[in-house]
Image (cartoon, grey):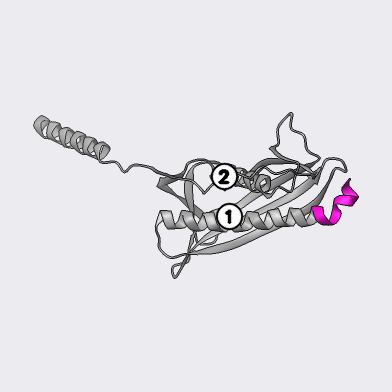
Amino acid sequence: MHRTIRLTLASLLALSLSACGGSKPIRYYTLQVPAAPTLTANTSSITLAVASVNGAQIFQSGPIAYRIGVNEIGTYQFSQWAEPPVNLVRRRLIRMLRGSGDYQSVTELGTNSGGQFVIRGRLYDFEEVDSGSSIAALVSMEFDLYDRKSGKVVWSHYYSQSEPVQTKDISAIVTALDLNLDRGLKEVAAGLNQYFSTNLGKQS
């Protein structure tokens, strides 16, 4: 009986060691970073500060998410973002606004940051959606513009779109999320530009 126990323990140990040696590596993904903006003379007096983007806890960590049905979200164990999606969204937006050349400055909101206007955002969805017959990359987010001088929200924009994915491959899903996010943030940038073009005289 003791011999049987020893053989069983040895077998379990061997299985454990083989499992550790053959574990699947974690793959990390990130989004495309827009090209560095061309420095041009800008006569705009508008200064923007971009606050941290809020979101559910799942978007404040690394795993890539997928939706199961209407109310359940899961994550891939071995496929993760290089940094939390809320950070990726904020960094992309700042880069895009700086590259537009429409503003005197665009900075991250901090204890010493200036800027009359603060852009605040929330990420609602940033995941794969598999309906069985099709796969899509869903991005839903909302941004508003807070005027420090008046103490009011003066503009807001909600975006929610799905980008088709041809294959259930993580790299394809990441590419679709990237394209979808880029489209949504361009809407945000265009909306901000339109707001200031229309209301700049009232805000000065």
Query: Label 1: which residue?
Result: 181
Tag 2: residue type?
Answer: Leu
Does residue 168 show up magenta in the picture? no
| Residue 60 visible in the current orientation | yes
Quadrant where the N terminus lies?
Answer: top left
Dot 2: within a 10 Å radius of its alpha carbon, few (fewer than 14), some, or many (20 or more) residues? some
**Residue 91 in the image: x percent, y percent?**
60, 43
**Does the CB distance between marks 2 and 1 fall below 8 Å?**
yes
Quadrant where the C terminus lies?
Answer: top right
Does residue 201 show up magenta in the picture? yes
Residue visible at 49% across and 46% down in the picture: 30
Determine which of the numbered discs, if any, sits on residue 88 in the image: 2
Magenta stretch, main secondary structure, is: helix
Residue visible at 62% across and 60% down in the picture: 160
Q: Start and end of the magenta stretch?
A: 196-204
Does residue 54 appear left or right of residue 75 in this picture? right
User: Of marks 2 and 1, which one's residue comes earlier in the chain?
Assistant: 2
49 versus 134 height, above or below: above
| Residue 55 visible in the current orientation | no
Does residue 127 appear left or right of residue 96 in this picture? left
CA distance for labels 2 and 1: 10 Å
Residue visible at 60% across and 46% down in the picture: 92
Q: Nearer the viewer, residue 143 or 112?
A: 112
Residue visible at 71% across and 47% down in the picture: 101
Dot 1: within a 10 Å radius of its alpha carbon, few (fewer than 14), some, or many (20 or more) residues? many
Residue 162 found in image quarter:
bottom right
**Residue 150 in the image: x percent, y percent?**
88, 43
**Residue 115 in the image: x percent, y percent?**
78, 38
202 versus 60 height, above or below: below
Q: Secondary structure at mark 1?
A: helix
Determine which of the numbered discs, if any, sits on residue 106 in the image: none
Tag 1: residue type?
Answer: Leu
